[in-house]
Amino acid sequence: MIRSPGLSLTFVALVLLGGCAQAATSIPVYNYKVVHSYPHDTGAYTEGLFYKDGYLYESTGQAGSSTVRKVDLQSGETVQRYSVPSQYFGEGIVDWKDRLVQLTWQAQTGFVYDLASFKLRRTFTYPGEGWALTRDDHHLYMSDGSAVLRVLDPESLASTGSILVTAGGEPVTNLNELEWIKGEIYANVWLTNRIARIDPATGHVVGWIDLDGLFDINQLPDPGNDVLNGIAYDAAHDRLFVTGKRWPALFEITLVKRPAP
């Protein structure tokens, strides 16, 4: 997604968090510790990310340069790549069985690839924008930039339900990159340094992860757009990874619960 001109990250954070701060004070906040950092391609405008069998799978955006990649975690090197047709802006990805499913931003078109070869199997359509995907063992979950997560049938890719995400009773908009972790959906909140931990049964935010200070985006050529976005989880080894658009590093972090005020 492209940031609207003149829209400051601070302003968005205040609108998102300040309006419902009083009602949401009981929601736990987590700080972080960096366990390790790994190289990340600064040409990768990260829109989708997940970890599988020792590799990161990444979808990058920007019309004309969107890709799907299989990336070696340790080196950050791309070992397999598919270039998305130039008219599409690549967005979220997720694996399902032997397939890889990818969204595009505003074209209302998604792609299904063979997971091993990245060969295109078919396309599918959906209304509105596509931002991100994750899954559990039964469903796919899709964000579209609103406060509503769509629930998709993983075979037909048709919508079967929805989840309204709220914090302190207020909708949480700009839900972006998603990851299923231990029964919760983690969601980057676009243009902030926060990740929402969402209970999929209720849609309630049950925790905030505050990643302030993780990386100074002012070092990057386009700090207005090159923001935090990208969550991956290695369930076998309980490792949580985060990165951002065109960031030079991907960080493995652990969470530390902040004492209640």
Image: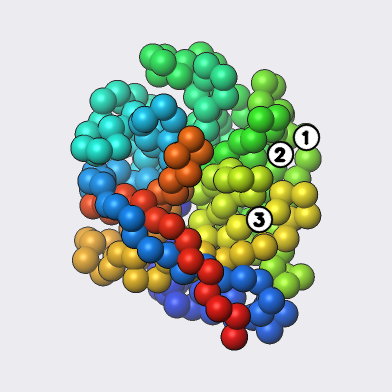
Q: Are marks 1 and 2 in contact (CB under 8 Å)?
A: yes
Q: Which residue is mark 1?
A: 160
Q: Secondary structure at mark 1?
A: strand
User: How far, Cα to Cα, is label 3 from label 1?
Assistant: 19 Å
From this view, report whether residue 209 is shown above or below residue 260.
Answer: above
Q: Is residue 177 left or right of residue 199?
A: left
Between 5 and 118, which is closer to the camera in this rendering? Answer: 118
In the rendered view of the protein, which quadrant contains the C terminus? bottom right
Q: Which residue is mark 3?
A: 198
Q: Secondary structure at mark 3?
A: strand
Can you see residue 103?
yes
* Residue kind at label 1, given as amino acid type: Thr
* Residue kind at label 3, given as amino acid type: Ile
* Residue kind at label 2, given as amino acid type: Val
From this view, report whether residue 137 is shown above or below residue 89.
Answer: above
Instruction: Look at 61% across and 64% down and name the residue there.
Output: 207
Instruction: Look at 65% across and 55% down and name the residue there.
Output: 198
Q: Is residue 224 left or right of residue 92?
A: left
User: How far, Cα to Cα, is label 2 from label 3?
Assistant: 14 Å
From this view, report whether residue 124 is shown above or below residue 13.
Answer: above
Disc 2 versus disc 3: nearer the observer:
3
Can you see residue 192?
no
| Quarter-of-image position of residue 53 | top left
Q: Which residue is mark 2?
A: 151
User: How far, Cα to Cα, is label 1 from label 2?
Assistant: 6 Å
